[in-house]
Image (cartoon, grey):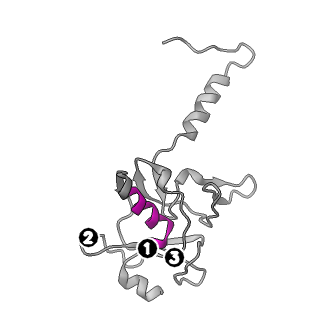
Amino acid sequence: MTEPFIDPWAPDAYEQWQARVKDKKRNGEVCICGHSVKYHKAASTGGQVFCVPGRTVCECRTPRTALIVSDLRQFMQKTEGTGALHALGKGIATGKRKGVTMTPILTACDDCHRETAEGFPVAPAPIDSTGRITDVTTQWNLLLCRDCGAKRG
């Protein structure tokens, strides 16, 4: 392997370029909002975090890794409700059809804290400022079991 060209006027340019390329690589982490964790960027003023997945608008402000996947392309959907209508649910369904490997990180209901087991599924849900489930994207997303989802519905 040949050594990279080192510009005598900018000796750290190569290291800066390598750091930028490394930062751009996707590590497969999917946020509970249903988009790549890498899409969450801090604003230059105030440090507030915004999720910017392509042309979609996502209100998520606090990234929480829900899954680690082998292909992030399926996780560019828009939230239109809970479960299968949530961006995370849509991405999981599309990923399963396309053979994407997925490792769940969050496996318990956010309200009752029971662990996911066979026959005890949890589903992603957007929550509004009053704590109720809504059909539009919000800055709060939770994984809820059926019982806890019914209570918040």
Q: Is residue 112 magenta?
A: no
Determine whether 33 is above or below 74 in the image.
below
Task: Give residue 129's position: percent from left, percent from top.
Answer: 61, 80
Q: Amino acid at mark 1?
A: Gly
Task: Give residue 29's position: percent from left, percent from top.
Answer: 46, 52
Helix, strand or loop at label 1? It is helix
Q: Is residue 93 magenta?
A: yes
Instruction: Give the labeled residue for mark 1.
Output: 83
**Mark 3 or 2, closer to the camera:** 3
Instruction: Give the labeled residue for mark 3.
Output: 81
Does the residue at mark 3 contact the one at mark 1 (Cβ under 8 Å)? yes
Helix, strand or loop at label 3? It is loop
**Mark 1 or 2, closer to the camera:** 1
Measure the C-alpha gap from mark 1 to mark 2. Answer: 17 Å
Task: Give residue 67's position: percent from left, percent from top.
Answer: 41, 57
Q: Image point 32% across, 74% down: which residue?
A: 114
Q: Amino acid at mark 2?
A: Ala
Measure the C-alpha gap from mark 3 to mark 2. Answer: 24 Å
**Which of the marked residues, 3 or 2, is nearer the chain's N terminus?**
3
**Residue 49's quadrant in the figure?**
bottom right
